[in-house]
Image: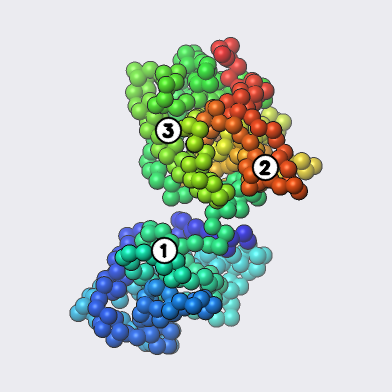
Amino acid sequence: MDYGFFYLINHGVENELIQKALEESRNFFSLPLEEKLKLPRTEHRGYTPLYAEKLDTSLHSEGDLKETFYIGTLDDDKSHLNQWPSQEILPSWRFTMELYYEKVLSAGRRLISLIALALNLEEDFFLKAEPLYPFLRLLHYPAEQGMLDEKVLGASAHSDYGMITLLVSDGVPGLQARVIFKVFACKDTGFFYLINHGIEIELIQKALEESKNFFSLPLEEKMKLAWKEHRGYTPLCSERLGDVKETIYIGPVEDDKSYLNQWPSRDILPSWRFTMELYYEKVRAAGRMLISLIALALNLEEDFFEKDGPMDPFLRLLHYPGEQGVLDEKVLGSSAHSDYGMMTLLVTDGVPGLQVCREKTKKPQVWEDVPHISGAFVVNIGDMMERWTNCLYRSTLHRVIRTGQERYSMAFFLNPFPDSVVKCLKSCCSEASPPRFPPIRSGDYLKERYRANNIGNTGNDQ
């Protein structure tokens, strides 16, 4: 509804097959031109050489700098029109492409049926009249030497003609949507999912496991790490919000205050510190990359949010205990709140409970569940990013309800350098939309919010 672009994961097409199909595609495009031209495109199937197509006819360029190969339907009365390289040259090419075609067709049919259901149609609505008529198109964009002519594109601006397109690439960048990372989600809900973040699922699972190990310790053992200097353990209902959760905070692991972090004894949890430090560094790297993309989307320099100094991120491990009997709906795992920093990267154990409220001021408030996606981070905009962007990017109210199930999560808060002054960006204000917030030092804002919510009040708050 917003971009018309989205990612599809858990699609059932084996990664090995995708890589094999990409490899066979490279093998074909590596052939001499005269060999490829033995399969010239006819009946919408076969090879088209460089510059043979121009998707945007308004351009004055010769054509698009790409070569392609089309494969049509495999099991209808026109399958004989497909053209295949000689098996003597590429012996496994046809088998691989036919298998890949069938697997992606199966995934596409499932996706189309879900779209039908989302539109309140019968599941087979788009298949009722005739079967789908899908085409597979292999593309090669050659590398270039010397200066690039910006007027010559690999694929000029266009929209696709059919119902939906499933695209896989070799990872080399180049694809752009017209909206380019303006992050509609930042403006709409302030929440989105982050995938392909570079953090191994094994590390995420290990960190969640170590988190469970810590919260399983006796209370007296956990209280040895009582919260101070914004680091350490906070027991159940210790915050002013009175939420039914316990937490432990971990601050920067390599700056001049890293010694303030508190760690469980290695005799009790031998690999805990190593795991958490590694997880911290990996998520910090992903967060820095994401923040740089946000800067570019706001027409700022890539390092804008770290110009005054490095970010001051905190990792917060959370445990919501399971409960027996009737739940009091007025008591929450985490009461309605917005996050204080620039952005938060959250991962959970998959147990539901997280909800968002798009409209803070609307009465009654409408709460929506945030579904779990395995391996993905839930990212939400924080208060300081909202202040910087003059509410263009939204710091959305969210909460965690109690379901009776035990729940674990890990929140990574991307806070600016403490001396950074958060003030409205010039690009986000005008006469019609003046700045809504006064400038404030990042460190002062965080202290004010911590004090207001009494975070960490365990008798050791300093």
Q: Which residue is mark 3?
A: 280
Task: Give above or below for 304 relative to 81.
Answer: above
Amino acid under disc 2: Asn
Question: Which dot, 3 or 2, sits closer to the camera?
Answer: 2
Q: Which residue is mark 2?
A: 390
| Neighbourhood count class around disc 3 (C-alpha, 10 Å): few under 14, some 14–19, many 20 upward | many
The residue nearer to you, when weighing 76 against 63, is: 63
The residue nearer to you, when weighing 217 against 422, is: 422
**Residue 204 percent location from the top left of the image:** 42, 39
**Residue 191 percent location from the top left of the image:** 59, 46
Mark 3 vs 2: CB contact within 8 A: no
The image quadrant that residue 203 belongs to is top left
Please count the marks in the image. Answer: 3
The residue nearer to you, when weighing 444 against 187, is: 444
Q: Residue drawn at (48%, 31%), measured in percent from left and top?
A: 309
**Residue 367 percent location from the top left of the image:** 69, 43
Residue 168: numbered disc = 1
Task: Give above or below for 24 relative to 245.
Answer: below
